[in-house]
Amino acid sequence: MKEFLTVGQIINTHGLQGELKVYPLTDDIRRFRKLKKIYIDNVENTVIWCKLQSDKVILKVEGIDSIEKAQKYKDKYIEIPREEAVPLSEGEHFIADIIGCKVLDENGRELGTVYDVIQTPSNDVYWVKGNTEVLVPALKTIVSNIDVTKGIIIIKPLEVWQ
């Protein structure tokens, strides 16, 4: 499992004093208010303040005090140590832990590995790449078991749910 989790992507600058406009990659945008330290390119940075917009976050980071300095961070990702992540409820998993898991059906047939997780309003969808590509809805009626420590996801046979 990854030591750091990505919580946002810097999409632009904001203002002239080096503020960063961030697209959140987390379910709860309010979690940014609690961040004191963030990592960009594996370098620890101190968050001075945070302002929430409807779907974006504006961060002021120590040492980034001009628009020129802020522009160097555009398109970079903001990470936090796993131990600082929001606790998950039972049955929930971080997307970073799902990606790369092997997907097998209940009969033991390997379908491939999770290449990406597509988030939709109703449910997540696992994009599985193997000999063919399969989109697997992340529903309890289809996904039988997820074991991220072993890197395995078990699903109902395709014939049953397609």
Image: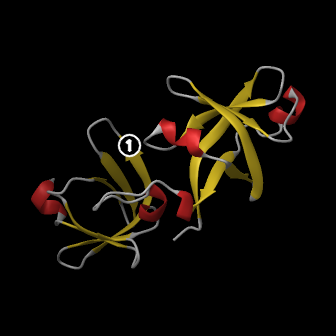
Q: Position of residue 51 (x, y in %)?
A: 62, 28
Q: Amino acid at mark 1?
A: Gln
Instruction: Find disc 1 in the rendering and name its residue.
Output: 119
| Viewer-nearest residue: 92 or 35 | 35
Q: Quadrant of residue 101?
A: bottom left
- What residue is at 28 percent from the left and 44 percent from the top? 123
Relative to 138, residue 52 above or below:
above
Dot 1 alpha-carbon crowd within 10 angstroms: few under 14, some 14 to 19, many 20 or more: few
- What residue is at 87 percent from the left and 32 percent from the top? 65
Q: Position of residue 49 (x, y in %)?
A: 69, 34
Q: Residue furthest top?
A: 15
| Viewer-nearest residue: 126 or 134 | 126
Q: Quadrant of residue 120?
A: top left
- What residue is at 83 percent from the left and 21 percent from the top? 16
SS label for mark 1: strand
Left or right of 131? Residue 65 is right
Left or right of 138? Residue 54 is right
Left or right of 51? Residue 55 is left
Q: Position of residue 14 (x, y in %)?
A: 73, 23
